[in-house]
């Protein structure tokens, strides 16, 4: 088993059991205990677990990793201000992708004043909110339901995305770095987000300032794919200059008063 599937296995077991032993990982993944310890060290460095004698336990990062409801409350005010700014890039009659991220979810209230939009998504919370806006046509792609993330994934989802084109895609990211680009804490979520980005003329990444120069579990796209990043005023001047030096367009949203 390769490195990425091993990490996915470890995180899934931690979500189910709360802890995992080195010997169990080595046996299930068919690797040595030395390799297993190296994997745990890498995940601990990312804040996704805490190593203990003979294994690892779930960290707060893993506990919030799989829950849409918990994640949507983290940095909520910043997410709202980011989405308010993002809505200014939407025009009447646009066809837009909205991924299942908890930041992009807060874009929905800012769509109510448009008279005509089409929204393509795999997110059940997005669909649930948009049902109250009859002027917005909603296209929910099919797939297998992940009840914790409240989203649809899998081959059927990918097939559905292949049939659409959009003017703009609004997507999230768990991590953004100059070297590795955009990354996610979940591989299947990343694949959907990447498909949306590739099928859109413009790509807007919505993320709070805590995500910059941090790598998440799974890299899914280079920064060359995106149109711009919309973030909050918490981004440091040093980080801002680094990205602008590399010709990455960053837009800073204003706090909502």
Image (cartoon, rainbow, N blue to C red):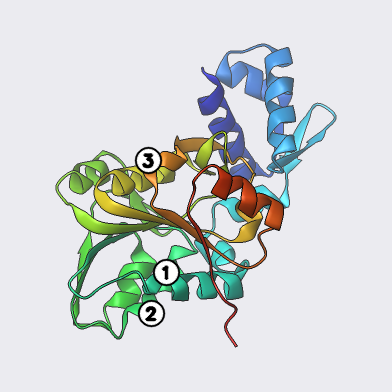
Q: Where does label 2 land, which residue?
A: 110
Of the 4 image quadrants, the one containing the C terminus is bottom right
Residue ID at (68%, 44%) = 18
Q: Are marks 2 and 1 in contact (CB under 8 Å)?
A: yes
Residue 190 vs 101, above or below: the answer is: above
Q: CA distance from mark 1 to mark 3?
A: 22 Å
Of labels 2 and 1, the one closer to you = 1
Which mark sits nearer the N-terminus, 2 or 1? 1
For label 1, the SS is: helix
Q: Residues within 10 Å of mark 2 (few under 14, many from 20)?
A: some
The image's mark for residue 86 is 1
Say if 173 sits above or below 25 in the image.
below
Q: State how many labels appear.
A: 3
Residue at x 70% of width, y 57% of height: 236
Nearer to me, 219 or 179: 179
Give the mark, 3 or 2, whose residue is nearer the N terminus. Answer: 2
In screen coordinates, is 225 left or right of 138?
A: right
Whole-percent x and y of residue 88? 37, 74
Q: Please state the horizontal and vertical placement of residue 169, each as a whole percent of the image.
A: 32, 57
Residue at image x 75%, y 35%?
56
| Image quadrant in which you'd find residue 101 | bottom left
Judged by depth in the image, the label closer to the viewer, 1 or 3, is: 1
The 10 Å Cα crowd at callout 3, few under 14, some 14 to 19, many 20 or more, is many
Q: Between marks 2 and 1, how big is the CA–CA gap?
A: 9 Å
Q: Which residue is mark 3?
A: 191
Q: Which type of secondary structure does the marked residue at label 3 adopt? A: helix
241 sits to left or right of 69: right
Counting residues from the start of the chain, the first of labels 1 and 3 encountered is: 1
Q: Residue furthest right?
A: 53
């Amino acid at each position: 088993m390769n490195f990425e599937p091993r990490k996915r296995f470890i995180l899934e077991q931690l979500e189910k059991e709360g802890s995992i032993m080195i010997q169990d990982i080595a046996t299930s993944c068919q690797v040595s205990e030395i390799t297993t310890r190296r994997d745990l060290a890498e995940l601990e460095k990312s804040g996704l677990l805490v190593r203990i004698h003979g294994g690892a336990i779930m960290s707060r990062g893993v506990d919030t990793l799989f829950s849409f409801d918990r994640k949507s409350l983290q940095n909520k005010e910043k997410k709202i201000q980011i989405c308010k700014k993002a809505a200014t890039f939407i025009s009447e009659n646009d066809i837009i992708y909205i991924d299942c991220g908890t930041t992009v979810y807060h874009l929905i209230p800012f769509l109510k004043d448009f008279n005509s939009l089409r929204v393509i998504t795999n997110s059940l919370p997005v669909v649930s909110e948009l049902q109250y806006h009859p002027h917005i046509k909603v296209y929910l792609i099919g797939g297998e339901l992940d009840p914790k993330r409240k989203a649809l994934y899998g081959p059927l989802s990918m097939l559905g995305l292949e049939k659409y084109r959009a003017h703009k895609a609004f997507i999230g990211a768990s991590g953004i770095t100059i070297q590795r680009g955009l990354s996610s804490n979940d591989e299947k979520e990343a694949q959907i987000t990447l498909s949306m980005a590739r099928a859109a003329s413009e790509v807007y990444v919505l993320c709070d300032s805590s995500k910059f120069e941090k790598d998440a579990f799974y890299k899914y796209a280079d920064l060359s794919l995106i149109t711009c990043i919309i973030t909050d005023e918490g981004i440091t001047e040093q980080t801002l200059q680094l990205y602008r030096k590399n010709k990455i367009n960053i837009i800073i949203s204003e706090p909502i008063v």
